[in-house]
Amino acid sequence: MFGRSSKPIKVQVFGKTDLGKTRDHNEDCFLVADLTRGERSLPPTMHEHEIGERGALLVVADGMGGAAAGELASQMATDTIFDQMEKMWGTEKELTPQRFAYRLKEAVEVRGMGTTTTAAGVLVDHVYITQVGDSRAYLIRNGVAVQLTKDQSLMQRLVEAGELTEEEAAHSERRNIILQALGPDPKVKVDLTHQEIRRGDVLVLCSDGLSGQVKKEEIAEVVSRASDLAQACDRLIALANERGGPDNITVIMARFDGDGLRPAEAREEVGHQIYPLIDTETSTEPVPVYKGSPPPVPAKQARWRLILAALLAVAIVAGVLYWVNRGQ
């Protein structure tokens, strides 16, 4: 495979979802899959394997309450993304980063009901992340957590515009207003980013039930102190519930190791980095421009058109009768 090291790259993954303290049903769903073997694990289990030539897939989906059954929407999203990756990437002959990123983005462009989705595909020493909505991906390196995704939310727009600080946005009553979700809109803008992985990195995917209650610095501290990923997930979920647990809480953690990965260097860039697909592999179609209906015809103009049509019909009939009589 293109760029594949002969040395092993190992990943240890654990995921868990929790109802929270105020909801009566869980609208979150998550997925952990080994794309080389075509296997998906059932929660909550520790999944540990060597990353094969077709990589691994992690997905968190957060269904929108009241949007055609959020729990069904998130389950459909995770199932569809896995099925599409199995069908398209699983039979792909050109095993390159470009094709992997393209297939991942294509798989997330699903049609369904209302849900946010953050899907991470791991191939060799890179993670590719597709984002729709406000679930998040963080990378923890050397005890520091960096957010890899940008929320597709009203608050994120206001922060980027300089209207609010991140602290103000985190406490705003409008912080749950998202600008996109899979399903309700005929077209979605899938944010595709990437990040090089280093030995010892921990990737964290979570729904806003966690990120809304626990800061990234606290996530990094919990992961650094925990004896394993299962304990870290349990502690983060407990922390969100201690702070009210107003929403469902879902966390996936993946720790990377192996001689196929380089050690981290201080000067390396970590963060939100757009992955540029080449033109022939851009699958999201632009939203068609609505040009409007033809303007209504004024009543007076419509009346004259009717009169002219009637006169034309009379003229045609008279002409036909004239030629018939002339022939006789």
Image: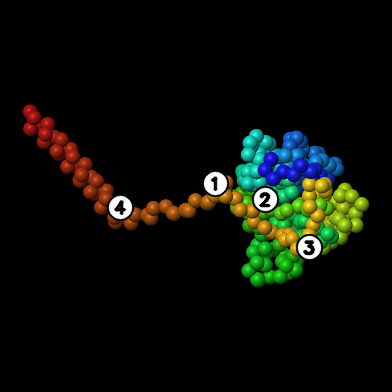
Residue ID for mark 1? 280
Residue ID for mark 4? 302
In the image, residue 35 lies at what x, y percent?
73, 38
Q: Badge 2: few (under 14), some or many (20 or more) residues near its Cα, within 10 Å?
A: many
Residue ID for mark 2? 130
Residue at the location (76% across, 52% down)?
197
- Tell me the kind of residue under disc 4: Ala
Q: In the displayed structure, would residue 167 be above or below residue 232? A: below
Q: Which residue is farthest right? A: 227
Q: Name the residue nearer the viewer: 111 or 72.
A: 111
The quadrant holding residue 29 is: top right
Residue at the location (81% across, 61% down)?
144
Q: Which residue is farthest front? A: 6
Mark sitting earlier along the chain (2/1): 2
Q: Are marks 3 and 4 in contact (CB under 8 Å)?
A: no
CA distance separating discs 1 and 3:
36 Å
Residue ID for mark 3? 266
CA distance separating discs 4 and 2:
53 Å
Query: Could you tell whether 156 is left or right of 298 in the image?
Result: right
Mark sitting earlier along the chain (4/2): 2
Q: Are marks 4 and 2 in contact (CB under 8 Å)?
A: no
Mark sitting earlier along the chain (1/4): 1
Residue at the location (63% across, 46% down)?
98
